[in-house]
Amino acid sequence: MTIKRVTFLQELLAFMGLEGRLHLDWISSAEAQKFVQVVTSFTNKIQSLGPSPLSGDFDMSAIVSSCEAVQDAASVEGG
Amino acid sequence: MQEQVREWLEQGKVDIFLGYKKIQGHPLPHCFTRDNLDESDDLVVGNARYSLEKMATKIAAEHKELKIGLLVRDCNQRALNVLYVWNQLRPDNIETISVNCCPSKLKEHGDCSYLEPEKAAPLKMMIGIDNNMDVKAAEEFGQEDRYKRWMYEFQKCLKCYGCRDICPVCFCKECSLEHTDLIATGSIPPEVPIFHLVRAVHMGGRCIDCGLCEDACPVDISLRLLYRKVNDIVSDVFDYKTGTSADQSPFNMLGEEVTLKPKPI
Amino acid sequence: MDFKLIPSTCSYCGTGCGVLFQVMDGRLVDTLPMKTHPVNEGKLCIKGWNLHEHVVSDKRLTSPMLKKNGQLQEASWDDAIQTTAEKLKAIIEAHGPDSVGVLASAKITNEENYLVQKFARAVIGTNNVDHCARL
């Protein structure tokens, strides 16, 4: 049940462009090594993805101007 | 069709019939009753779509034994199926008359406001999402581009709750979107993208792709596309086709049946 | 069991979106937008969606109220109008007609708005007339 819900959420976030930041695992309190492994690899993965686009203030005009299509349109001569 | 309705009301097959009637030039939903049998001559289909099944749910909540007849298009029928699964309506108390709807070249005549969908404006195509594109096309944008385009759409939100108020399968008495601990009050747009993602998750296993939410959105957010993706996920991951399956949704509160045998103490 | 759907116009702002009231057993229960209305084409703002609550609210006033001894108490129309007229006259005598401002409204008819500005200009004697939509 949990796997289903988490997979669902992962796919939804991926559709929106926030993929790869949710991970699910089952670790018993006796499996210390596995815990270390999972946490380290996930931490590295997150660090390589960089800060979440949701952190910090949301600046719509910056987003608009950095969008490729707008940059293309603005760079057309005489346009 | 009008004769059928008149017959049903006379014979007592239904106590009321929800259809449309032209009032001052507008095709509006109307409740035809046995007391005004002559009105059944005014029954029309019209091209405006209202959520008749949501009205039926409200009526059934107060008058549990009433037999209700409805004029249904394909989308209404799917909504009814979902409402049966979630115990909001009893199939024994509902009778339907189906009408042609689907915007397909194969059907000679269709009565649906989606027959000619509106084209998206140029700015929306440039930095937002085109409402008419399908899920595959929307997944072709790069990850960052996708994020920016969806955030552009979501930050237009006015928090009018129109999408929730008009949705035929939204029936919760206490909506999480109104819970002050979950969604902060006093700001517009409402906590992007949490508000919309919460709604999208709640639509998993319930949304039947009628498009009324997109029609009701004053700022034209591509809600139908988002919920279509949600239902694609539900059908891929859970093998559950909302609206046509007779089983309970994979997201129902009671969870799954336990298959492990209890261990001996 | 009685279920009626009554088309009407939203009474909040000056836009005038078309709404459909759902009346069940004589009670107003819900508001829907009118999809074929040229003004809103099936969309409503949050105020429009909750119009039915405003109409059936317990907090609606049923009679004019006057402040007596620091508390609002029910009064008759004659008393209310008389008190208002006396107080306005006193203010105008003390501080001049330009100390009074008059606000017209989008919820009243054009003819009533005309009366409002006539009242301000001819009766009170001031040009301070404005409309709620400009605020």
Image: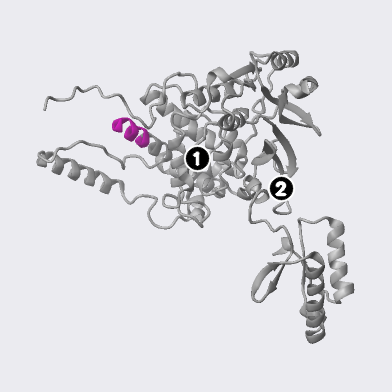
> Where does residue B122 sit, x and y in percent of width and height?
61, 41
The chief SS type of the magenta part is helix
* Side (left or right) of B32 relative to C113: left
Question: What residue span does the magenta drawing correspond to?
Answer: A1-10
Amino acid type, callout 2: Cys
On the rendered image, what quadrant is the C terminus of chain B found in? top left
Residue C68 placement: quadrant: bottom right
> Where does residue A66 sit, x and y in percent of width and height?
47, 50
Q: CA distance from mark 2 to mark 1?
A: 25 Å
Instruction: Work out whether C84 lies above or below B245.
Output: below
Q: Which mark is residue C10?
A: 2
Residue ID for mark 1: B173
Residue at the (65%, 34%) spot, across then down: B118
Asked whether residue A9 is drawn in magenta, I would say yes
Dot 1 falls on a residue whose secondary structure is loop
Instruction: Looking at the picture, tell me which residue is in the foreground, B27 or B5.
Output: B5
* Mark in front: 2 vs 1: 1
The answer to the question of whether label 2 and label 1 lie on touching residues, with beta carbons closer than 8 A, is no
Mark 2: few/some/many CA within 10 Å (<14, 14-19, 20+): many
* Chain of the residue where label 2 is placed in the rendered structure: C
* Chain of the residue where label 1 is placed in the rendered structure: B
Residue B51 in view (yes/no): yes
